[in-house]
Amino acid sequence: MATNEVFRDGDRLQVACTHPATPVSGDPVRFGQRPGVCEVSEGSGGLASVKFSGVFEFPVKGVDGSGNAGVSEGDVLYYVDGDTPKLSKKTTGVRFGYAMGGVASGETATIRVIIGY
């Protein structure tokens, strides 16, 4: 083991999320430009336990930067701070992961999402 190694796996860390400001368990989150999922809600110290890899189910909106657009398996999804739900094909957001299911144009559906890229 390298003497400067701090964590063997960096896929689960306690961090101060960039967005949302106070995440709760199950929320998609971002830590700077890194996508993740809040596993343990933010505590009084301002840190949340975040998982940075895996497959999770999230609501995804069938839109892109031009308007309504269907989501297909394998499409890249982005996290957009000001949107509800946070995940869609809008490239103005932070790259979040990959769709494992489809969403009809203009609709919102809960699908599996592979975190990361």
Image: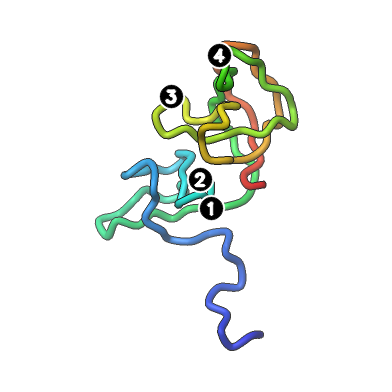
Q: Residue at x 64, y 36 (%)?
A: 113
Tags 2 and 4 in contact by the CB under 8 Å rule? no
Q: Decide: few, some or many residues near mark 3? Use Cα within 10 Å; few <14, some 14-19, many ≥20.
A: few
Find disc 4 in the rendering and name its residue: 67
> Which is more N-terminal, label 2 or label 3?
2
> Which is more N-terminal, label 3 or label 1?
1
Q: Closer to the camera: disc 1 or disc 4?
A: 4
> Which is more N-terminal, label 4 or label 1?
1
> Which is more N-terminal, label 3 or label 4?
4
Amino acid at the residue labelled 1? Lys
Residue 10 position within the rendered picture, expressed as x and y whole percent measured from the top left: 57, 64
Distance in Å between CA atoms under marks 2 and 4: 26 Å
Q: Closer to the camera: disc 4 or disc 3?
A: 4
Give the SS element for disc 3: loop
Coloring basis for residues: rainbow
Find disc 1 in the rendering and name its residue: 51
Tags 1 and 2 in contact by the CB under 8 Å rule? yes
Q: Residue at x 67, y 36 (%)?
A: 98
Give the SS element for disc 1: strand
> Which is more N-terminal, label 4 or label 2?
2
Distance in Å between CA atoms under marks 3 and 2: 16 Å
Distance in Å between CA atoms under marks 1 and 2: 5 Å
Q: Residue at x 45, y 39 (%)?
A: 27
Give the SS element for disc 2: strand
Amino acid at the residue labelled 3? Thr
Residue 28 — which label? none
Q: Decide: few, some or many residues near mark 1? Use Cα within 10 Å; few <14, some 14-19, many ≥20.
A: many
Give the SS element for disc 4: strand
